[in-house]
Amino acid sequence: MGKIHELSSVLADQIAAGEVVERPASVVKELVENSIDAHATQIDVLVLEAGVQSIRIIDDGDGIADEDVLTAFKRHATSKITSRADLFRVHSLGFRGEALPSIASVADVVLTTSTGTTGTSIHYRGGKLLKQAPAPLRQGTDITVTDLFFNTPARLKYLKSAQTELANILDVVNRLALSYPEVAIRLVHNSKELLKTAGRGDLQQVIAGIYGVQNARKMVEINGKNEDFQVSGYVALPELTRASRNYITVLINGRAIKNQQLTKAIIKGYGSKLMVGRYPIAVVDLKMDPLLVDVNVHPTKQEVRLSKEPELAKLISSTITDRLADVNLIPSALQNLGSHRRERLNTDQLAMDLNAASSQYHVAQPSPRKPVTPTPVSEAVPAVEPLPASEAPATVEVQTTAAPENESAATEPIMISDRHQLDTTAVLAFDDKYQAEDVALPFGEEPATTAADTTATADDEVPEEAVVDPDAGERFPELRYIGQMHGTYLLAEADDGMYVLDQHAAQERINYEYYRQAIGEVSKDQQNLLVPIVLDYPTSDVLKITEQLPLLAELGIHLEAFGGNSFIVHAHPTWFKAGQEEDTIKEMIDWVLRDDKLTVAQFREKTAIMMSCKRAIKANHHLDDQQARALLKKLPTCENPFNCPHGRPVTVHFTNTDMEKMFKRIQDSHESTTNH
C-alpha cells in the first residue's frame, strides 16, 4: 500500500480552518463579510463569553436558496466568482468558499436562511450534517456558532483572555462598520450593547460612534485623486494622537487591509506635526480599479498586493499634507489641561440613541475666530435692576468688579430678563463709567496715541507694532510680547486671548526650516579641520558605508578610506555647530547604517531636524525683550509655525472666554442652577 493518500474532507476542512479560523474574531469577520456580500442593510452580532460560548449573526440580506444550502458548506463553493478572469476583478469581500466549511468543521453551527419565498434550517457539528428542515420565511440569514474549537483542544488552549478576544472581535466589527457606513451594525456582548451604527452612510457618524464625539470633532475630511486612485476619509488633527498605529484604518474598495507602506504614507502626510512615537487616528478609504489590487495573497485577505503602490502612497501623503496646511493647529490650553483630569461620565451621550443623534456627529469646519473688540456694556453684559421673583424667568447673574459712583453703596448683583430693560438708569450709569476708561495694556506698554496726539508729539516713542509678518495670513495670530516665565516660556497676547509659547520648540521650528533650505542647496563651502576626524567601524558597517558614500557626499560629508576599517574626514559643511562636528557626522552615518534605503530627501530631512534641535535655545535660558520679540516676529513666517520638527506644539491658546471662566467672570446665577 502506498504511503501517499488523500485526506478526508473533515480533516481537510480542519486544516483549512487553521488558516481561516484563528480565533472567535475570525468567525465574526467571515460571517459578517458574508452578510455584507448578501446586501444586508442591518446586521446584529450577538456574542457570549467573548465568542467562545456562542456567536450569532443575524442579517436581512438576500438569504440562501434551499437548493444551495448544502452546497454552501462544501469546500471552495462560492457564488462570488465563476471564472479565472473574475479572480482579478474581485468586488466582494469573500470569494474562496472556505469560511462556512472551515467554521462548521471546528464548531457546532446552526444556520437558518430564507430568500423570502422558501426557508431552510441546517445543523452541522464537527463537519458532519446532523439535521436539515424547513424554516420560517423571514428574508435573511441567522447563523449561530457554539462550542468553537471543541474538537481541536490545542487551538482552544492557546486562546487569550476573554477581554483580549473580545477586544479582537470589537476591532473587527469596528473596521467593518467603518468600511460600510451604509450598513447598520450592532454588536452585543453578554446582553450589553458595545456598538451601534445608524447605517445612514455617514462615515463621520460611525467614527463618532467608535472613537467618541469629541474625537470626531477633531478630525477633518480629506479628498484627493489622480488618474488611477481616489482617496477620501477623515484624519485627526495633530493634537489628537495615540501610542500605536492600531487607530489607523486603511480601506481598499471597502475592504479593511493591513499595508505597512500605506500606513507610513499616512504618517508621512503629517510631516513634522506629529510627536515622536505618536500616531494619528485616521480612516482612509481608497477606491481603485480591482485590476490594480490582488486580494488573493493571504488566507484572511487582510494583506493585498498593489500595483503602482509608490504612486498611491505619494497621493495619500500629499492629500493629507495639503488638507492640514490650511487648518489652524494651535491647540486650546484648557483642553490640554482638561485631558489630564479624570474623565467624567457623559450621561447625556450614553443616553442618546445613535439614530436620533446623527446630527451631533456632524463636524463642521470651524469658522475663523473674530477679533474681540471692546463693546458697550449694554451689549456685552446686559444688566438691569432685579425683578420680583414672581415676574423673573430663568435669569443670569453677572457679577462685575465695578463699584457705584457712591463708593459707600453696596454692590448688588444686577439681573436681566427683558431686552427693554437695557435702557434703565443702572445700565446707562454702568456704561458711562466703563466707556470712559482706557483699555488695560500689558505691563511696560504705553497706551496707543490718536492721530492728533501723534502729530503733536512726533518725537515721542510710537507704540510697539505687532510682531508678525503681514504675509503670514490668518493662520497664525498677531502676537504682542508680554514676558517670559522661568526662562522657558514666552507669554504673548492677541485680540482673541493669551498665547503661551515654548521658546525651544519655536526656535527649533525656525531653525528647521532654515536648515531644510540650507541643506537642500548644495554648496561647496567647507570648514577645514585643524585635526582631521578618524572614524572606526566594523567590517560589516564599512561595507554599508562604502555603498552610501555618494549619499553622504550630497550633504557635504566626504569620507576617505584610512586603513582597514577606518575613514578620515578633513572638512565639514559650514552649517555644522562648532564643537559637535564629530558627533554630528557619526549620527548621520548611523542613519545610513540603520536604513540602507534612505533617500537623499529623507537624509536631508533627518539632518535638518537634528541640526535645528542642536542649535535651538534650551529651557532656563533667559531672553531679553529684543530677542523674544525677534523670535515672535520670525515664527509666523515659517511654513508650519504650529509644531516643532518632533511634533510638539509650539504654542497653546487661552481664549478670552477661557480666561473669564477661570476667573469666574462668566457664571450662572443661583436661580438658573437650582432650576435644572
Image (cartoon, helix red, strand yellow):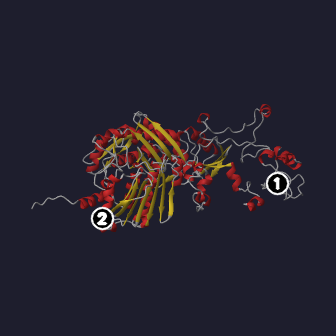
Closer to the camera in the image, 598 or 580: 598
The C terminus lies in quadrant: bottom right
**Relative side of 579 to 81, left or right:** right
Q: Name the residue under label 2.
A: 126
**Relative side of 78 to 200, left or right:** left
Depicted 386 relative to depicted 51: above or below: above
**Relative side of 305 to 434, left or right:** left
Rendering coords of residue 23 (x, y %): 36, 61
Q: What element carries label 1?
A: loop
- The residue carrying pointer 2 sits among few (fewer than 14), some (14 to 19) or many (20 or more) residues within 10 Å by Cα, namely many
CA gap, disc 1 and disc 2 = 77 Å
Rendering coords of residue 240 (x, y %): 53, 51
Residue 342 shows in the view: yes
The N terminus lies in quadrant: bottom left
Amino acid type, residue under disc 2 in the picture = Gly
**Relative side of 218 to 495, left or right:** left
- The residue carrying pointer 1 sits among few (fewer than 14), some (14 to 19) or many (20 or more) residues within 10 Å by Cα, namely many
User: Where, by quadrant of the figure, is residue 493 drawn?
Assistant: top right
Residue 557 shows in the view: no
Q: Kindly give the residue lying farthest to the left in the view shown.
A: 1
Q: What element carries label 2?
A: loop
Q: Between label 1 and label 2, give the one nearer the viewer.
A: 2
Amino acid type, residue under disc 1 in the picture = Met
Depicted 162 relative to depicted 488: above or below: below
User: Marks 2 and 1: in contact by CB < 8 Å?
Assistant: no
Q: Mark 1 points at which residue?
A: 415
Label whose residue precedes the other's in the sequence (1 or 2): 2
Rendering coords of residue 331 (x, y %): 58, 49
Residue 498's mark?
none
